[in-house]
Image: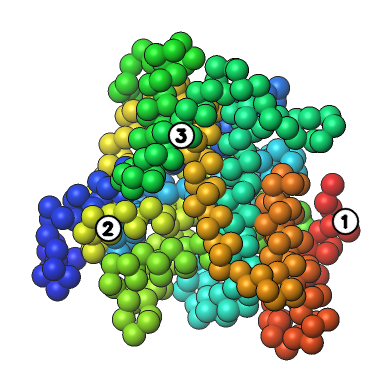
Amino acid sequence: MKKYFRFDELGTNYRTESLAGLTTFLSMAYILFINPSVLSLSDVPNLPDSMRMDPHAVFAATAIAAAIGSLIMGVLARYPIALAPGMGLNAFFAYTVVLTMGIPWQTALSGVLTSGIIFILLSLSGLRETIINSIPYELKMAVGAGIGLFIAFVGLKGSGIIVADKSVLVGLGDLSNGNTLLAIFGIIITIILMVRKINGAVFIGMVITAVAGMIFGLINTPHQVVGAAPSLAPTFGVAIQHFGDIFTIKMLVVILTFLFVDFFDTAGTLVAVANQAGLMKDNKLPRAGKALLADSTATTIGALLGTSTTTAYIESSAGVAAGGKSGFASVVTATLFLIVLFFSPLLSIVTPAVTAPALIIVGVLMAASLSNIKWNEFETAVPAFLTVIMMPLTYSIATGIALGFIFYPITMVVKGRSKEVHPIMYGLFVIFVLYFVFLAK
C-alpha cells in the first residue's frame, strides 16, 4: 500500500496521512447536517411534504456519496482531495429548482444524474479542455461569488436576522428572538474560530451553537447520539424512475447549471489543492482525467442514492496543510464518512439557527473570488456584476447565471471583442434568451 500511494516518493507516512484525512473530515463534516437541512427546505414554513426530501435519507445519501467519492479520488486519482455534496449546488437544487421553478425534487435528482453522466463523458473525452476554455474567467469567478452571496442570504433569512419588509422588501429581523440571538452567537463564535485558523472551524462552530441552544432551552436535547444508519428507501433510485421528465427546456437550463458549476468548481479545487500539496508538474495536473472521472462518478452515484451534486471540496486544503500528500488521506476521510452514518440522531439538534453560521461563513469564503474579476474592464464587469447581484435578489442561481451569460456576448460584441467570445458562449446566449422568453416566471 505504501508503494501504491508513493509514500517514500512524496515523503509521507501513515500517521501523517491519517491525521490529514481526519483534518479534512472535520473541516467538511458540516455538510452532513447542512445538506439534509437544505434539501428538506427546513427553513421554509408551510410547504407540502411532497416538496421536501426526507432529511434522514439525505443524511445517509450524503455520507455514502462522500465516502464513495473520496474513496474513488484517493484510490484512482491518488489525490488528498475529499468529495461530498457541494454547497451552492444543494442550494440551487432546493431553493431555485424545487422552490422557485416548482420542479419536483424527484425530477431534479434526474437532472443531477444526467449532469453526472455528461460529466463522465466529458472526463473520458478531450472535450473538457474545450469546455473549460469556452467560459470566460470573469464569469467563472462571478458564479462562485454569486452563489456565495446567495448562500449567505439563505442563512440570514433562515435564522430570522433578515426578514421580509413591505416597504423595502427586506429588513432587519427581531434581534430579541431567542433563535435569532442563537444564530448571531454562532456567527460570532465561528468567525473567531476562522480568524484563529482552527481546523474544522465551521463544524466546531455548529457544535458549540447547538450545545448553547440546548443549554438555553432553544433546542431539544437528543434522546440518543448513536443509532442505526437511516434508510435510503425514500430517495434511492428515484432519479432513474423520473428520468423521462427531464426532456424540457426548463430542465435543460437546470442540467446545464448543475454541469457548469460542478465542472468548474471541481477543476478549480483540483488545481488549488494539488498546487498547495506540491503535486503540480510543469504547471499541469497529473492524472487530471482520473480526478475529474472520480468527481463525475461520485455525482452520478450520489444522484442514484438521493442527494444533489457531489464535488471536490476546497476544505481538503486543511488536510494538505496538516501534511497530506497522497490519496491515502482521502481513504481515511471516506472511512470516517461511513462511520458517521450511525450518528443520524444528532440531526434533531440541527435547526436553522445552527446551520445559519455555516451558510454565512461559507458564503464569505466563496465571495472571495470577487477579487479576481477585472472591474476596470466594463465589458466584463457588467455581466459579472449581474451574475453576482441577481442570484440573491431573484433568489435564483440560474437567473444570475443566465443574465451574465446573456450580457457577456452583448458587451463584448459592442466593445469590438467578438472574436474573443467562444462559439459555445453564443450558443448558451440563445438558450438562456429562450429560457427567459418562454419559461422564466
Q: Is residue 325 above or below residue 155?
A: below
**Pick the front one: 73 or 326:** 326
Percent position of residue 225, x then y: 32, 21
Occupied quadrant, residue 269: bottom left
Please state which amino acid type lies under the numbered disc 2.
Ala
**Pick the front one: 64 or 332:** 332
Percent position of residue 383, x then y: 73, 67
Q: Badge 2 is on which residue?
A: 321
**Pick the front one: 206 or 309:** 206
Occupied quadrant, residue 70: bottom left
Residue 188, numbered label:
3
Residue 74, numbered label:
none
| Label 2 element class | helix
Q: Earlier in the sequence, mark 2 or mark 3?
A: 3
Q: Badge 1 is on which residue?
A: 438
Residue ID at (41%, 54%) = 313
